[in-house]
Image: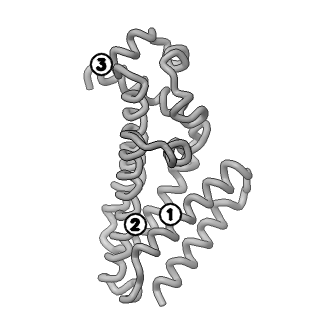
Amino acid sequence: MTKGQETRASILRHAATIASVHGLDGLSIGRLAGLSGLSKSGLFGHFGSKEALQHAVLESVIDDFRAAVVVPALRETRGSARLERLFDAWLAWATAGRAGGCPLLGASIELDDRPGRLREYLVDRQRAWLDCVAGAAQKAVADGDFRGDLDVVQFAFEFNGIGLAFNFAHRLLGDSQAADRAGSAFRALVASASR
């Protein structure tokens, strides 16, 4: 990795922290300069605009999610094991000590009614996530672990809903039982898919 790439990666880590706490709109070049120790002009040179910085932050967080959650799960050969790995890794990623919680969840709320490039990118990536879950469920059907008439799109919807409910209970409510409750809901979902 070149020095420029290292600097950019460091900037994006700081930017993701700011976006986690203050949202994408709260991600200003001035605030980032203060946190990263770089000049505003130096930061602007890396990204060129606030929207380009916001897009780079989303890409960076999604790349991190993919590396920590999706890629390890895809190494599982059975669909049911893949789903379990996706679920466990997602919860671990969501509780990784990130200030402000999941920047993707925050961005989805922030961008849901704002058309534009950032929203389109996030929608595309969230659809890819749901497709990944549905694909793993379809593999579990093909492996014989799940029933043949399973609606894998509905399964993905409910799987995602459990994760979102976990984030709400864990981050906002401070529910110490949030992980146990999410695990129980996931096991019930798998059991209903297996009948």
Of mark 3 and mark 1, the one earlier in the sequence is 3
Would residue 35 appear left or right of 61 to someone viewing this image? Answer: right
Q: Which mark is residue 4?
A: 3
Name the kind of residue labelled 2 in the image: Val
Would residue 25 appear left or right of 50 to someone viewing this image? Answer: right
Alpha carbons under labels 1 and 2: distance apart? 8 Å
Of mark 1 and mark 2, the one earlier in the sequence is 2
Would residue 14 appear left or right of 120 to someone viewing this image? Answer: right
Residue 152 in percent (x, y) is at 40, 76
Give 192 or 89, whichever is nearer the viewer: 192
Residue at the location (35% across, 82% down)?
A: 141
Residue 184 in percent (x, y) is at 62, 72
3 vs 1, front mark? 1
Q: Which residue is mark 2?
A: 133
Q: Which residue is mark 1?
A: 160
Of mark 2 and mark 3, the one earlier in the sequence is 3
Residue at the location (49% across, 26% down)?
A: 14
Residue at the location (33% across, 14% down)?
A: 45
2 vs 3, front mark? 2
Provide the secondary structure element on which disc 3 rests: helix
Q: Residues within 10 Å of mark 3 (few under 14, many from 20)?
A: few
Do tag 2 and tag 3 residues touch (Cβ < 8 Å)? no
Provide the secondary structure element on which disc 1 rests: helix
